[in-house]
Structures are given as structure tokens and as C-alpha cells.
Image (tube, helix red, strand yellow):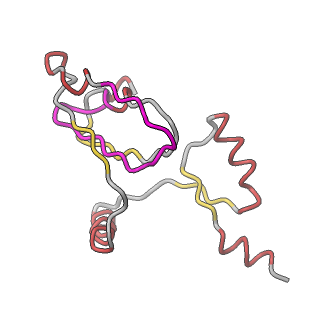
């Protein structure tokens, strides 16, 4: 992350657990935006000085948040991702792998977002 400090125009933070914001703010360029869409169960600590202090080349940054958009916004996002070949990195897991996935989360052994394949898990369990 050190090499990427001050290089990003924007970051969408989807983490819904308590986590430090300072490293993310440090990645932003001046006028950069950090958009929070995750919903932690407790308030996050927001360091103010890195948002303000332009003389250190870290200031003039914006932190905002949003809940999920409506159908129009979702379709615009899907169209944008398709046009620019933007894809998410995921690890598809079955429902019976959830306990192992939680242990991996606790150990920090996760590279991608877990997506639980409920449909195929349920279909496989039918007689």
C-alpha cells in the first residue's frame, strides 16, 4: 500500500466490520473521495486532520456514504462496469463451507469476497 499512497481518485469501501480508515484516506489524492457503503455495527473512527491538511499533500479529501441505489443507478453501474471490463474478484462457496470461511476471515486468509451459492447448495441437498 505504501507505493499506492496518494494515487487514488476514489475508493468505494464495502467493509461492514470495524476497520481503520486512515490507511484508505492515505491512498487518496487531494480532492479524492472515500465512499462508505458498508454498514459496521459500531461507529468507525474518522481521523479529521488527514482530510484537512493540504500542506502535507494529504488534505482536501472527502468522505461520504450511501446505501444501495435504485434500479436506475444499479443499471448504470452494471453498464459502466461492462463498458470498461470491470469485474469483481470473488470466491464462490457452498453453504456448508460457511464455518470454514468464517475461520479464514478471522485468520485474514481471504483474498476475495465470499459469495455463498445458495441455489446450487439447496439443489444438491434435494433428494
Quadrant housing the N terminus: top left
Q: Residue at x 22, y 37 (%)?
A: 62
Q: Which residues are magenta?
A: 25-47
Q: Looking at the picture, does residue 35 appear above or below residue 60?
A: below
Q: Looking at the picture, does residue 73 appear above or below residue 19?
A: below
Q: x, y percentage for residue 124?
A: 77, 75
Please identify the residue farthest to the left as the structure is shown. Answer: 55
Please check the rendered image and state whether residue 75 is part of the magenta-colored stretch, yes or no: no
Q: Residue at x 48, y 33 (%)?
A: 19
Residue 20 location, quadrant:
top left
Residue 57 location, quadrant:
top left
Of residues 110 and 59, the one nearer the viewer is 59
Q: x, y percentage for residue 78?
A: 34, 68
Q: x, y percentage for residue 23?
A: 38, 27
Please check the rendered image and state whether residue 42 is part of the magenta-colored stretch, yes or no: yes
Q: Looking at the picture, does residue 4 appear above or below residue 122?
A: above
Horizontal side, residue 21 vs residue 49: left or right = right
Residue 83 location, quadrant:
bottom left
Horizontal side, residue 123 vs residue 58: left or right = right
Q: Residue at x 19, y 24 (%)?
A: 52
Q: Looking at the picture, does residue 120 appear above or below residue 25?
A: below
Amino acid at each position: 500500500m505504501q507505493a499506492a499512497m496518494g494515487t487514488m481518485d476514489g475508493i468505494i469501501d464495502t467493509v461492514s466490520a470495524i476497520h481503520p480508515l486512515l490507511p484508505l484516506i492515505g491512498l487518496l489524492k487531494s480532492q479524492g473521495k472515500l465512499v462508505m457503503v458498508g454498514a459496521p455495527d459500531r461507529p468507525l473512527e474518522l481521523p479529521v486532520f488527514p482530510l484537512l491538511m493540504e500542506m502535507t499533500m494529504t488534505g482536501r479529501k472527502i468522505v461520504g456514504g450511501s446505501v444501495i441505489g435504485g434500479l436506475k443507478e444499479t443499471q448504470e453501474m452494471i453498464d459502466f462496469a461492462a463498458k470498461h471490463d470491470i469485474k469483481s474478484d470473488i470466491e464462490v462457496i457452498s453453504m456448508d463451507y460457511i464455518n470454514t470461511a468464517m475461520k479464514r476471515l478471522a485468520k485474514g486468509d481471504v483474498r476475495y469476497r465470499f459469495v455463498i451459492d445458495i441455489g446450487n447448495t439447496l439443489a444438491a441437498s434435494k433428494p
